Image (cartoon, rainbow, N blue to C red):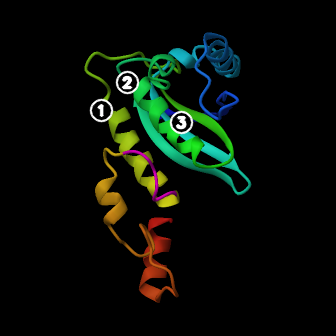
Amino acid sequence: MEYYPYGQFVIPKTAKNRIDTSKAAMSAFWATVEKEKKGLPEAVGCYVFSIRAGRGLLPWYVGLAEKQSFHKECFTIHKLVHYNNTIAARKGTPVLTLVPKFTSTGRFAKRGKNGHSDIQFLEKMLIGLAVRRNVNLVNIKHTNLLKKMIVPGVLNTPRGRKKQPVEDFKSLMGT
């Protein structure tokens, strides 16, 4: 199972600071994605909605596309509610990063009626990484424990000086 990230594709906004879901804007967006990598809009995998601002990128939502393509999944009404609420409350440029799954022959994996267990696992892992960067991640699924759990050096590390065992564990876990 191989994945590769593409993107920081800029998501079009309206003058009212909402995602521009007009046919023209969405066609242009997906054409940009297609230009980056042929067939990418029809691929499956995980995606990350982020906002790029002065301090770089901050993830706000992690999702998966396994039963339908990125093109069909990334801008559903449910996702647009999350995206629009997020961009309304802050400055910056909304971007989408796509992490498609590849087959052993180097082609994009296809949609599956029963999904892909590895894509589901990857989504949970990416949510865990994203919550480390942004405790205000808008995902509801798979975040409750991650937001409450404290593992110094790895997850939700309290402020203050870290003791040597915490530093050692942090180094061991590569965080």
Which mark is first along the chain, 2 or 3? 2
* On screen, residue 27 above or below 126: above
Q: Residue furthest left?
A: 114
135 part of magenta stretch: yes
Label 2 amino acid?
Glu
In which quadrant is the N terminus drawn? top left
149 part of magenta stretch: no
**Which stretch is magenta?**
134-139
Q: CA distance from mark 2 to mark 1?
A: 9 Å
Which mark is first along the chain, 3 or 1? 3
Q: CA distance from mark 3 to mark 2?
A: 23 Å
Label 1 residue SS: helix
Specify few, some or many for label 2: CA neighbours under 10 Å numbering under 14, 14-19, or 20 or more. Answer: many
x and y, in percent, of residue 26 in the image = 61, 17
x and y, in percent, of residue 50 in the image = 58, 43
Residue ID for mark 1 = 117
Label 3 amino acid?
Asn
Specify few, some or many for label 3: CA neighbours under 10 Å numbering under 14, 14-19, or 20 or more. Answer: some
State the residue in front, 59 or 69: 59
Residue 66: image quadrant is top left
Residue 132 in the figure: left or right of residue 19: left
Q: Mark number for residue 66? A: 2
Specify few, some or many for label 1: CA neighbours under 10 Å numbering under 14, 14-19, or 20 or more. Answer: few
Q: Assess whether mark 3 and mark 1 are in contact (beta carbons under 8 angstroms).
A: no
State the residue in front, 166 or 1: 166
Identity of the residue drawn at 70% across and 17% down: 35
Label 2 residue SS: loop
Q: Assess whether mark 2 and mark 3 are in contact (beta carbons under 8 angstroms).
A: no
* On screen, residue 28 above or below 64: above
Label 1 amino acid?
Ser
State the residue in front, 120 or 28: 28
Residue ID for mark 3 = 84
